[in-house]
Amino acid sequence: EMTRFRLSHIGKSAKEVRQAAADFIKNQPVSPVSVFLFKQYFLLDTNTEETELIALYQQLCQAQPEDLHLLQWQSDVESLTKRLAVGDTLPEFRLMMKDSAEVKSSDFKGKNLLINFWASWESESSAAMFRIKRIRRDNPGKMEFVSISLDVNKTSLKNIERIDSVVWPSYCDLMGWGSPALKQFYVPSIPYYILVGEDNRIKAVGSSYNDEILPEINKIIDK
C-alpha cells in the first residue's frame, strides 16, 4: 500500500504529495500507512499548520486509539503547536557546559545569536558546525553562537567538535530526544536553527538553513 502511494506520486511537487498524504489519512485513517504518512509529511515538517496537524492527529487517534506510535507522539504534537515563531521573544535559558561554565540567555543581551540543534549521527545537522566555524572566522564580532547536541555517545560528540574546532558554547546532556533543552525550545527535528536579533526577538527559525536562516544571517553580516 505504501509502495502504491509512492509510485502514484512520482514526479509530483512536494505540495501535491503532501495534499495526497492528507487525503489518504482522511480516507483511510485505520491504515498503518496513514500513521507513517502523518509522521513523514506532517509531524516532521516544520511548516505544518497547527490546525491541520491537530485535525489529522485526532482523526488517527480516534481510528487507532491503541497505536503505540500515536501515543508516543502526543507530547511531540503538543510541542509543535507551541513552536517558536519569527517575532517571538527568545525564552530564557541556562545551560551548564562540560567545563562547568554556565551559559545563559542574558549573556547575549544586545547581540545577534544563532542557536543550532544537531547530532553527530545526523549528517546534515553536523554540517552546520562547519558553517558556524566559517561564519565566525569571516565575520568576527557579528554574531554569537550556541550549539545544542542530541548525541548520546560522548566519543562521537568529541570527534566532531575536534574536527570542526568547536570553540563556541557547545551543550550536550547525553539525553538525546529526552533533553529538557529540546523541550524548552520546542524542537521538532534536526537540523534546527533559531536566529535571534539584538532585540532578543527571533528573526528566523526552522530546519532549512539555506532557505530560512541564511538570508537573515546575510542581512546581519551585511550591516
Image (cartoon, rainbow, N blue to C red):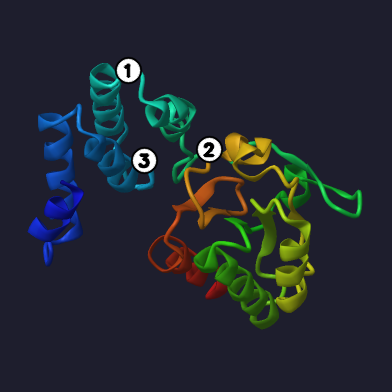
Which element carries disc 3, helix, strand or loop?
A: helix
Which of 197/48 is in front? 48
User: Mark 2 or 1 closer to N-term?
Assistant: 1
Which element carries disc 2, helix, strand or loop?
A: loop
- Mark 3–mark 2 Cα distance, whole angstroms, equals 13 Å
- Mark 2–mark 1 Cα distance, whole angstroms, equals 25 Å
Residue, disc 2: 186
Q: Amino acid at mark 2?
A: Tyr
Q: Amino acid at mark 1?
A: Pro
From the top left corner, tell me how far across and down residue 86 is, in percent: 44, 46
Q: Nearer the viewer, mark 2 or mark 1?
A: 1
Residue, disc 3: 43
Tell me the crowding category of disc 1: few under 14, some 14 to 19, or many 20 or more residues within 10 angstroms, Cα based. Answer: few
The reply to whether callout 2 and callout 1 are in contact (CB within 8 Å) is: no
Mark identifier at residue 88: none
- Quarter-of-image position of residue 49: top left
Q: Residue at x 48, y 48 (%)?
A: 189
User: Mark 3 or 2 closer to N-term?
Assistant: 3
The reply to whether callout 1 and callout 3 are in contact (CB within 8 Å) is: no
Tell me the crowding category of disc 3: few under 14, some 14 to 19, or many 20 or more residues within 10 angstroms, Cα based. Answer: many
Q: How many marks?
A: 3
- Mark 1–mark 3 Cα distance, whole angstroms, equals 18 Å
User: Mark 1 or 3 closer to N-term?
Assistant: 3
Which of 61/188 is in front? 61
- Quarter-of-image position of residue 42: top left
Residue, disc 1: 65
In this rendering, is residue 68 above or below 132? above
Q: Residue at x 68, y 61 (%)?
A: 145
Q: Amino acid at mark 3?
A: Leu
Name the residue at the bottom extreme.
Answer: 138
